[in-house]
Amino acid sequence: MPVSRIRSTVAAGAAGVVAVLAATLIGLPPARAATGDGSPTDANIAFVGRWDRSDSSAYVPNWAGAYLRTGFTGTTVKLRQRRTIDLYYSIDGADFRYLTNVSGTVNLTPNPLPAGNHTLVVSYRVVAGSYAGDAVFQGLTLDTGARTLPAVVRPRLIEFVGDSITLGTTSSRTALTAYGWLTGEQLGTEHTQLGYGGGCLVATADGCVSVASQFLRTGYAANSPAWDFSRYQADAVVINLGTNDRSHGVSGADFQNQYATFIRTVRGKYPRAAIFALRTFSGRYAAETAAAVTTVTGGGDRNVFYVDTTGWLPADGLSDSVHPNDAGHRAIAARLAPVVAAKLSTTPTPTPTTAPPTTPPVTTAPPTTPPVTTAPPTTAPPVTTPPAGGTGCAVGYAVTGQWQGGFQGEVTIRNTGTAPVDGWTLQWSFTDGQRISQAWNASYTQSGGTVRATNAGWNGAIAPGATTSFGFLADATGANNRPAGFTHNGTACTLS
């Protein structure tokens, strides 16, 4: 995350190597001051997220979830703050502590630490809405003879783009208890949240701010300078937009078209990032979001994924009618983290695309399917032989959404036998040239019209009488007839 380019004055030896690594991943500030002195331009301090560094004596974090991290020696550490601000800090990996209305020289160690090497992370409360604190970092004050140490920078970075839900509004620690922060921590990556309370995907005549437009800027203010995307490159971008557009009169067709355009904008800035388009937790514009992803993947970019979040929020997961509470954000992160991890481990290079086609209008209601999970393997997976005993299966096949050139399907497998299933492969054949482009809760291969779907890591076991399901997106240019037959681990299934 941002931290400007390193100039040639980098500490020698191991410390220099770590500082260079940090610069490569998230860009460290110019070494106008001595490395180790704790000033904003100290190359040992990593500034994660979008920080305005136009004033070398005072760095300003923009958007939520921006933070700084560094190491230091000695027994005490103090922040130099310009005016009053609320902030969170963690020393040596301990739980974050919250300070309110602090200013001037802020002592983060009222009880001195043991002498030695330590780590520090600081995150300022996001300045938004009615809160107008002065989130300005002016440096660190350390013990006499102490110095900062190179920040230990995590190897990957995830950017979360959305509205007040992404900001963590109504959760106990706002950005720090939001699903984006929690997901990044669970995966051991750097992370940042770009969100605008009440923001929309599409700018509207009645004043809804387009987060897609502000994505190109350093901060959320309309006059914020353009962001320099060379400061860092995200490895993944998670988009959650559409909750507010409906109340501002944005049509489904306009939302779908502009969503596809925004995905291409993100791709232009982050050529190698995996891009995830979340179904809004309220389900608004779900089919339009899925169709926008289909449009982009159909243009050749196979590193974009629709994530259906149906069922992710528990019954007690909201603090009001819209915003997740702490339990809700934890539940989202628990479902989202493995989805993102699966793509980060095998991130392909996106195929350059030609001029974007016009996105077709959606013709059906939003789909309701489980989340994206695994990428299709390059070879057909082996069929797992079920345990000895009575075997039997019934398959349900449904088209849950359809638009010009594509559709979304859901498949349910019921174990009608008397023995449990431990691993499954379902095979069927399309007869009208349908081609799957993405699946969730299963991996797949397709040769001609023949499709083989294999369980994910967590849904291979099906007890007698129980069911499991998976979903997919597919291209269809003409007729879209239902497959005539299915086999489960080589056994013919009845159609339900």
Image (cartoon, rainbow, N blue to C red):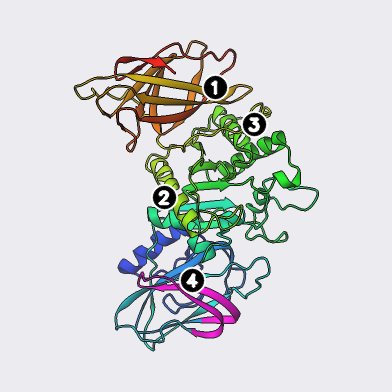
Type of amino acid at the residue the image marks with label 3: Pro
Point out the stretch of residues depicted in magenta.
80-106
Give whichever of discs 4 and 2 has the lower sequence position: 4
Task: Give above or below for 77 relative to 6.
Answer: below
Numbered mark located on residue 475 in the image: 1
**Image position of 118 (left or right of 287):** left
The amino acid marked with disc number 4 is: Ala
Q: Secondary structure at mark 1?
A: strand
In the image, is residue 309 above or below residue 37? above
In the image shown, does 494 or 445 lie closer to the viewer? Answer: 494
Residue wearing tag 3:
356
Q: Nearer the viewer, mark 2 or mark 1?
A: 2
C-alpha span from label 2 to label 1: 30 Å
Q: Residues within 10 Å of mark 2 (few under 14, many from 20)?
A: some
C-alpha distance separating marks 1 and 3: 17 Å
Toward the viewer: 390 or 370? 390
- Is 211 covered by the magenta stretch? no
Provide residue 405's location: percent of width, then percent of height: 60, 21
Residues packed near mark 1 inside 10 Å, few (<14), some (14 to 19) or many (20 plus): many
Circle 4 residues within 10 Å: few <14, some 14–19, many ≥20: many
Q: Quadrant of residue 406?
A: top right
- Residue 31 is labelled as 4
Mark with earlier residue (1, 3)? 3
Q: On the image, numbered disc 2 is attached to which residue?
A: 334
Observer-side mark, 4 or 2, equals: 2
